Structures are given as structure tokens and as C-alpha cells.
């Protein structure tokens, strides 16, 4: 337990030192390095982007030729680069006026429900968020694009992940080092959207 606290404090302090709001940036950067998701010039949609660590990382990776749009119900306290737009909105209410036609190379989601401590209830709510996120993917992700999301472990989450193989050429689950050992969360990388 003590070693785990030290490890997590390390990620937290490192994030702050590098100008990121949260340690979650190291989860994304590790996944990105492993699966080579994000490239210069990409258009990226970040669902549930608060407090903004993923938004900042994505902005840096896509560069001046790329664009990142972040969506969240909560405000973010982050100075945005010129290639980044923040929309305060429920993802259920997104429209073509907000986002345009299918133009995103990547859609990412680090959304998580407010946890209750009940594993099955939290997992069910996490899965609901990802089902909504996938509806966004079907509307706005380009053919050949990628989808990355976080979900809590459950039988239903496993089935949902397995079902995504119908829509993507490659679907992989992964637990980054910055994830707390006690956490039941994992990430799913879906590459090369078929539709």
C-alpha cells in the first residue's frame, strides 16, 4: 500500500511539474506510444475532457495543422492552444452544428461516472457512458479512424468490447502503469473504423 501511494504521488507530482492538471496524461501517453494512435495534423475529439490533461497532450501531439475539440459538462481551468476548442455541453446533445460532418481521425473518452463504491453499479454506469460515446463515434469518426475509451471491468463491458470487433479491424484492452492497482478500470483501443 505504501509503495502504491509513493508511485501514485510520483505520477501526480510529475503531471503538475509538466503543466498537466492530472496524472491521467501518463495513461494516454503510454497508450499512444504503444498503439501509435495520434499523429501530427489529426483532428481529435476528446469526450469528457475535464480537467484537461488529455486535451493538452492531444493539442501538443497534433500540432498546428491539427485540431482538438474537447467536450464536458464541467468547466476546465486550462489555457487553450490555438488548435484547441472547448465546448461545455452534454455529449448526448452534440449536433452537426457543433462538430460538422464525419471528420475526426480519433475520438477519445476518459469519461467515468461518479463512483458510489458499488462495483457492479459503477461498472454499469461506466458502460452506459461508453455506449453513448460509441453513438458519437458512429456519427463523427472517419472511416479508418480510431476510438479509445476507459471502462470499468464487468462481464457486460467484456461483451461490449468484443462487439466492437464488428466495427474496427483491431480492438485491444490495456491497463497503463499510471492506473491505480486497486482500480477496476481499463482502456480499450479500437483501430481502423470500418464504416
Image (cartoon, rainbow, N blue to C red):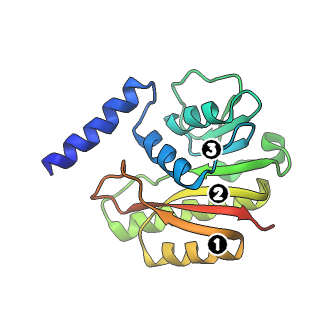
Give residue 82's position: percent from left, percent from top.
Answer: 70, 22
Mark 3 lies on residue? 46
Question: Which residue: 40% across, 67% down?
Answer: 121
**Circle 3: is it few (<14), some (14-19), or many (20+) Cα within 10 Å?**
many
Question: Which residue: 50% across, 66% down?
Answer: 173
Q: Name the secondary structure under disc 3.
A: strand
Looking at the image, which residue sits at the far left? 2
Q: Is residue 136 in view? A: no
**Circle 1: is it few (<14), some (14-19), or many (20+) Cα within 10 Å?**
some
- Sequence order check: which comes first, mark 3 or mark 1? 3
Give residue 6's position: percent from left, percent from top.
Answer: 20, 41
Disc 2 to disc 3, C-alpha distance: 10 Å
Q: Are marks 3 and 1 in contact (CB under 8 Å)?
A: no
Q: Name the secondary structure under disc 2.
A: strand
Question: Which residue: 79% across, 43% down?
Answer: 99
Q: Quadrant of the C terminus?
A: bottom right
Looking at the image, which residue sits at the far right? 101
Disc 2 to disc 1, C-alpha distance: 10 Å
- Sequence order check: which comes first, mark 2 or mark 3? 3
Residue 53, numbered label:
none
Number of numbered labels in the structure image: 3
Question: Which residue: 39% across, 39% down?
Answer: 23
- Sequence order check: which comes first, mark 2 or mark 1? 2
**Circle 2: is it few (<14), some (14-19), or many (20+) Cα within 10 Å?**
many
Residue 147, numbered label:
2
Give residue 194's position: percent from left, percent from top.
Answer: 78, 68
Give residue 70's position: percent from left, percent from top.
Answer: 64, 38
Q: Name the secondary structure under disc 1.
A: helix
Nearer to us in this view, 124 or 160: 160
Q: Are marks 2 and 1 in contact (CB under 8 Å)?
A: yes
Mark 1 lies on residue? 164
Amino acid at each position: 500500500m505504501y509503495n502504491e501511494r509513493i508511485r501514485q504521488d510520483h505520477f501526480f507530482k510529475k503531471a503538475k511539474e509538466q503543466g498537466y492538471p492530472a496524472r491521467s496524461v501518463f495513461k494516454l501517453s503510454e497508450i499512444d506510444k504503444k498503439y501509435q494512435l495520434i499523429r501530427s495534423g489529426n483532428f481529435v475529439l476528446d469526450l469528457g475532457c475535464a480537467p484537461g490533461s488529455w486535451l493538452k497532450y492531444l493539442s501538443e501531439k497534433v500540432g498546428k495543422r491539427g485540431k482538438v475539440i474537447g467536450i464536458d459538462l464541467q468547466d476546465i481551468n486550462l489555457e487553450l492552444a490555438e488548435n484547441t476548442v472547448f465546448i461545455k455541453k452534454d455529449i448526448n446533445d452534440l449536433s452537426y452544428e457543433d462538430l460538422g460532418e464525419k471528420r475526426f481521425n480519433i475520438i477519445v473518452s476518459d469519461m467515468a461516472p461518479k463512483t458510489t463504491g458499488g462495483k457492479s453499479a459503477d461498472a454499469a454506469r461506466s458502460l452506459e457512458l461508453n455506449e453513448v460515446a460509441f453513438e458519437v463515434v458512429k456519427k463523427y469518426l472517419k472511416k479508418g479512424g480510431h476510438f479509445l475509451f476507459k471502462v470499468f471491468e464487468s462481464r457486460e463491458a467484456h461483451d461490449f468490447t468484443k462487439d466492437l470487433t464488428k466495427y474496427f479491424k483491431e480492438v485491444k484492452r490495456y491497463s497503463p502503469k499510471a492506473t491505480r492497482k486497486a482500480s477496476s478500470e481499463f482502456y480499450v483501443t479500437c483501430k481502423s473504423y470500418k464504416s
